């Protein structure tokens, strides 16, 4: 269970430029709950770069710099709250990367043993790590390697997993040199209230976590820039992403394609 943040823009910009300085600080403060590491990936020209750190991002100057000091046409950033049983080490820290594709995940897929059986040791080793997210990424890459466009591979994989694991939470951000994909698929997933209680934050629990923990929101600026975030930010201009949907943002044109994912209860 984690926090997601991404932006795309017509010209290189920082995430702080796109969402505002106050929101950037507010998002980093989500690290007071999501303490199990952070990572980011961004476009450097047409190349994808990545940085991961398995320690908390709350007071980490490198995270502050990632949000505010390195302009890019696209960037995603992730704060990790580790699923029980998966160690906080760099190999398990998001985003995961294979070639020029990176993926970050908010949620979980259980039972893990049944999910793990769906991929080979070689497929998982290619992704790295040992988590449910790594398995999900391996399944997406299997389809993509077979010739499916990345958006098709992502949405087909999510639809399949939501059918087989109906209480799964699959909020995803996927970035390549050509596109940013955001997936909001988690109806029926339990909110981890016990983790919130264990944190001891009390009234300092971030906004939206009790009722809308898995909510994704988006907004578009006048210059065409688009931002996507998990719950936890306040302020005007954010629109809730519809449940069980996915969007693809073309990085060259900043056009948006939206796709409804098949409802779990309607799946055969």
Image: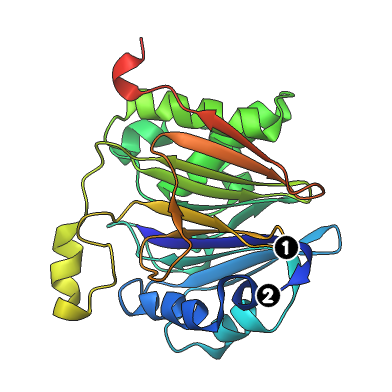
Residue, x 39% and y 81% (percent of image)?
29
Disc 2 target residue? 14
Residue ranking furthest to the right: 45
Q: Report the disc number at residue 99.
A: none
Residue, x 29% and y 39% (percent of image)?
110
Residue 247 shown left or right of residue 87 in the figure: right
In which quadrant of the rendered view does residue 115 lie? top left
| Front label number (1 vs 2) | 1
Residue 156 shown left or right of residue 214 in the figure: right
Q: Position of residue 31 (x, y in %)?
A: 38, 77
Asked whether residue 253 is in view, the answer is: yes
Where disc 1 sits, the SS reads: loop
Please, is residue 91 above or below residue 27 in the view?
above
Residue, x 71% and y 23% (percent of image)?
146
Q: Position of residue 55 (x, y in %)?
A: 45, 79
Please, is residue 228 above or below residue 21 in the view?
above
Give 32 or 122, whichever is nearer the viewer. Answer: 32
Residue 253 shown left or right of residue 7 in the figure: right
Q: Report the disc number at residue 223.
A: 1
Q: Position of residue 90 (x, y in %)?
A: 52, 68
Q: Position of residue 3 (x, y in %)?
A: 42, 63
Kindly indicate whether the residue at mark 2 contacts the one at mark 1 (C-beta within 8 angstroms): no
Residue 176 shown left or right of residue 5 in the figure: right
**Dot 2 surroundings within 10 Å: few (below 14), some, or many (20 or more)?**
many
Give 116 or 162, whichever is nearer the viewer. Answer: 162
């Amino acid at each position: 269970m984690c926090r997601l943040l991404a932006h795309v823009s017509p010209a290189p910009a920082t995430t702080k430029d796109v969402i505002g300085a106050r929101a950037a600080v507010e998002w980093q403060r989500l690290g007071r709950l999501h303490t199990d590491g952070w990572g980011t990936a961004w476009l450097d020209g047409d190349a994808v770069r990545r940085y991961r750190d398995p320690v908390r991002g709350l007071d980490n100057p490198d995270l502050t710099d990632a949000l505010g000091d390195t302009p890019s046409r696209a960037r995603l950033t992730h704060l990790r709250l580790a699923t029980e049983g998966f160690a906080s080490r760099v190999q398990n820290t998001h985003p995961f990367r294979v070639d020029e594709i990176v993926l970050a995940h908010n949620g979980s897929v259980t039972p893990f043993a049944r999910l793990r059986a769906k991929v080979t040791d070689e497929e998982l080793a290619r992704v790295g790590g040992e988590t449910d997210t790594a398995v999900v990424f391996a399944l997406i890459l299997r389809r993509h390697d077979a010739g499916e466009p990345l958006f098709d591979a992502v949405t087909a994989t999510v639809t399949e997993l939501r059918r087989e694991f109906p209480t799964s939470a699959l909020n995803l951000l996927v970035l390549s040199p050509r596109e940013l994909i955001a997936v909001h698929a988690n109806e029926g997933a339990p909110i981890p209230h016990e983790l919130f209680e264990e944190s001891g934050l009390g009234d300092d629990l971030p906004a939206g976590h009790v009722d809308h923990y898995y909510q994704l929101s988006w907004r578009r600026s006048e210059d065409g820039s688009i931002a996507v975030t998990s719950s936890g930010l306040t302020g005007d201009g954010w629109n809730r992403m519809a449940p069980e949907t996915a969007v693809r943002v073309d990085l060259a044109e900043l056009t948006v394609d939206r796709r409804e994912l098949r409802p779990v209860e309607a799946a055969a």
